[in-house]
Image (cartoon, rainbow, N blue to C red):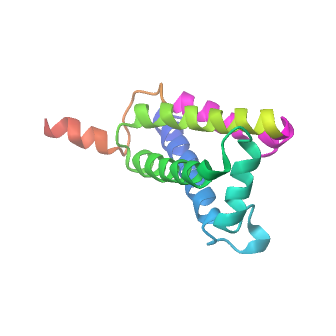
């Protein structure tokens, strides 16, 4: 399989994973197909995996994580600064994995493939060829 196709697949998989999680916590997925199904349930989970964060900051933390996921997903989908946003995605996913591991144990990290997603994002960050990316168009126009 060509590296360009693999890169496109990684971009799509990571982006759609972020978008799916965001739409889940905002209640857009059917309840029987959801993990959180509402913002309040998502914030309860955010508090669970971040026990050292004061309750008054949980909503802010959840909002920041959600905004980052949307921004990273959009940038990866369109191919804007792909290497940077892939690396940032890897660190965001790794931080989720560590928070989950230290608060609820390692099983959830494996069940939800958070480490695999983080590793995929880091792998994406080192693929230099451009394929269907805004960066390639911007580079040509300079």
Percent coordinates x, y for residue 80 in the rendering: 34, 42
Q: In the shown orientation, is residue 36 left or right of residue 83?
A: right
Residue plotted at (40% across, 47% down) = 75
Residue plotted at (75% across, 61% down) = 35
Query: Taken as a whole, is the magenta stretch helix, strand or loop?
Result: helix
Percent coordinates x, y for residue 126 in the rendering: 48, 24
Residue plotted at (85% across, 36% down) = 105
Q: Quadrant of residue 23?
A: bottom right
Residue extending farthest to the bottom is: 30
Magenta stretch contains residue 139: no
Q: In the shown orientation, is residue 44 left or right of residue 65?
A: right
Quarter of the picture holding the C terminus: top left
Q: Is residue 56 above or below residue 98?
A: below
Q: How many dots with numbers?
A: 0
Percent coordinates x, y for residue 49 in the rendering: 74, 43
Residue plotted at (41% across, 32% down) = 84
Residue extending farthest to the left is: 142
Residue range highlighted in magenta: 104-124
Percent coordinates x, y for residue 117 in the rendering: 64, 39
Magenta stretch contains residue 107: yes
Quarter of the picture holding the N terminus: top right
Q: Is residue 36 above or below residue 50?
A: below
The residue nearer to you, when weighing 101 against 81, is 101
The residue nearer to you, when weighing 120 against 27, is 27
Q: Is residue 12 above or below residue 10?
A: below
Q: Quadrant of residue 139?
A: top left
């Amino acid at each position: 399989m060509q590296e360009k196709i693999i890169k496109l697949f990684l971009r799509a998989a990571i982006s759609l994973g972020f978008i799916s999680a965001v739409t889940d916590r905002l209640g857009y997925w059917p309840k029987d197909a959801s993990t959180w199904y509402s913002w309040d349930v998502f914030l309860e989970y955010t508090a669970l995996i971040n026990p050292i964060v004061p309750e008054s900051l949980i909503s802010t933390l959840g909002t920041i994580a959600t905004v980052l996921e949307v921004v990273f997903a959009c940038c990866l989908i369109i191919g804007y600064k792909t290497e940077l946003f892939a690396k940032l995605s890897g660190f965001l996913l790794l931080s989720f994995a560590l928070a989950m591991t230290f608060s609820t144990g390692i099983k959830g990290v494996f069940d939800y493939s958070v480490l695999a997603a983080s590793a995929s994002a880091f792998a994406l960050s080192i693929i230099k060829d451009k394929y269907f990316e805004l960066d390639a168009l911007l580079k040509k126009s300079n």
